[in-house]
Image (spheres, rainbow, N blue to C red):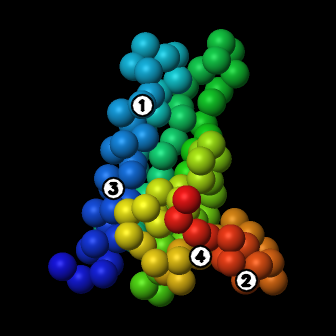
Amino acid sequence: MDRITNYRHIIERILAEHLEYIPKEREIETIAVSDDISNNFLLLDLGWQPTRRIHSVIFHLRIKDDKIWIEQDWTEEGVARELLRAGVPPQDIVLGFQPPDMRSYAQELLTVP
């Protein structure tokens, strides 16, 4: 299996694991979006609460230039840690939500707990 295909499988497994822990009786629906053509993967909250529209990105990952870019991450633990535990090397994880001039400092913090 090539690296990109492996990364897709890892990301899809992480999406599925997050969906398992969401209570089913919530008013807000959590959905996973996987697009293998553009290599974008999102976990979203959708719904109404009570009269306010909810449409928020929990996390957005994409595969670009043979690396996994974390474009947004509002998870408690941080999806970067999940990627590291799944075997993705730190040099293949880009913290896209950080300004480019700060990424090198943030990348140094990527370690497996």
Mark 3 vs 2: CB contact within 8 A: no
Q: Residue at x 33, y 55 (%)?
A: 12
> Which image quarter: residue 111?
bottom right
Task: For label 1, count other residues whose C-alpha is less than 10 Å away and answer few (under 14), some (14-19) or many (20+).
Answer: few
The residue to which callout 3 is attached is: 12
Which of the two marks, 2 or 4, is nearer to us in this view?
Answer: 2
Describe the element under mark 2 as helix, strand or loop. Answer: helix
Numbered circle sitting on residue 21: 1
Q: Position of residue 73 (x, y in %)?
A: 62, 53
Q: Is 56 above or below relative to 94?
A: above
Measure how far apart labels 4 and 3 are at the Cα level.
Answer: 18 Å
The residue to which callout 2 is attached is: 104
The amino acid sitting under disc 1 is Tyr
Tell me, yes or no, if residue 57 can be seen here. no
The amino acid sitting under disc 2 is Ser
Q: Residue at x 47, y 57 (%)?
A: 82
Please, which residue is most extreme toward the front here? 113
The mark tally for this picture is: 4
Mark 4 vs 3: CB contact within 8 A: no
Mark closer to the chain start, 1 or 4 = 1
The quadrant in which the C terminus is found is bottom right
The residue to which callout 4 is attached is: 94
Which of the two marks, 1 or 3, is nearer to us in this view?
Answer: 1
Of the pair 21 and 8, the residue shown nearer to us: 21
Q: Is 21 above or below relative to 23?
A: below
